[in-house]
Amino acid sequence: MFRHSERLRRLADRDGVTIHHAERTGPAEVWLVRLTAPPGRTTAGWTFLAPGEEPPRVGDVLEQWLSIAAGHHPMLAAPAPVRAALTADLSLLLGDLLPEYRTAAGTV
């Protein structure tokens, strides 16, 4: 399901991007996730749809969110205002690194 997750995980490890908080909010595959990056930047809580019972992994979360924000996710379409808000949140988290993450996710 996640083709670029490992590449994104390596970038996240390099840059200190981690899962700040993750909790199930409904069915087993629905999680509310917040990511964090140094120095103390944290995203708002966004939904992550996990492919199974395992907790979210940072590479999977980044791939899904970057794909949704770019309007490229094959199954999870979001309205333009939601995509814009997610993009803004990821931009605050990743700063100048956002284009590199987008490239790694295959969304550019």
Image (cartoon, helix red, strand yellow):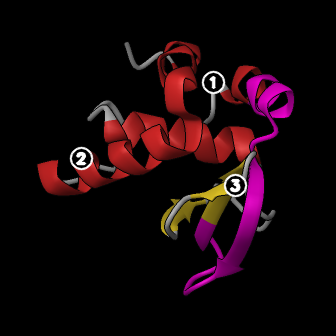
Q: Which residue lies furthest to the front in this view?
A: 39
* Real-space CA distance between mark 3 and mark 1, rounded to the nearest whole angstrom: 22 Å
Coordinates of residue 63 in the picture (x, y in percent): 56, 35
Hey, what amino acid is under mark 2? Ala
Hey, what amino acid is under mark 3? Thr
Q: Which residue is drawn at 47% across and 17% down?
A: 99
Query: In which quadrant of the rendered image does the C terminus lie?
Result: top left
Provide the secondary structure element on which disc 3 rests.
strand
**Which one is in front, 81 or 67?**
81
Give the mark toward the camera: 3 or 1.
3
Tell me where residue 74 sits by quadrant. top left
| Region in magenta | 9-33
Whether 40 is drawn above or below 99: the answer is below
Q: Which residue is drawn at 69% across and 54% down?
A: 36
- Residue that label 3 marks: 36
Q: Please tell me how crowded label 2 is: few (under 14), some (14-19), or many (20+) other residues with Cα within 10 Å.
A: some
* Real-space CA distance between mark 2 and mark 1, rounded to the nearest whole angstrom: 23 Å
Query: In which quadrant of the rendered image does the N terminus lie?
Result: top right
Query: Residue 84's mark?
Result: 2
Tell which circle, 3 or 1, labels the residue nearer the N-terminal end. 1
Tell me where residue 75 sits by quadrant. top left
Contact (Cβ within 8 Å) of mark 3 with mark 2: no
Hey, what amino acid is under mark 1? Arg
- 16 magenta-colored: yes
Coordinates of residue 10 in the picture (x, y in percent): 82, 24
Tell which circle, 3 or 2, labels the residue nearer the N-terminal end. 3
**Which one is in front, 21 or 97?**
97
- Residue that label 1 marks: 3
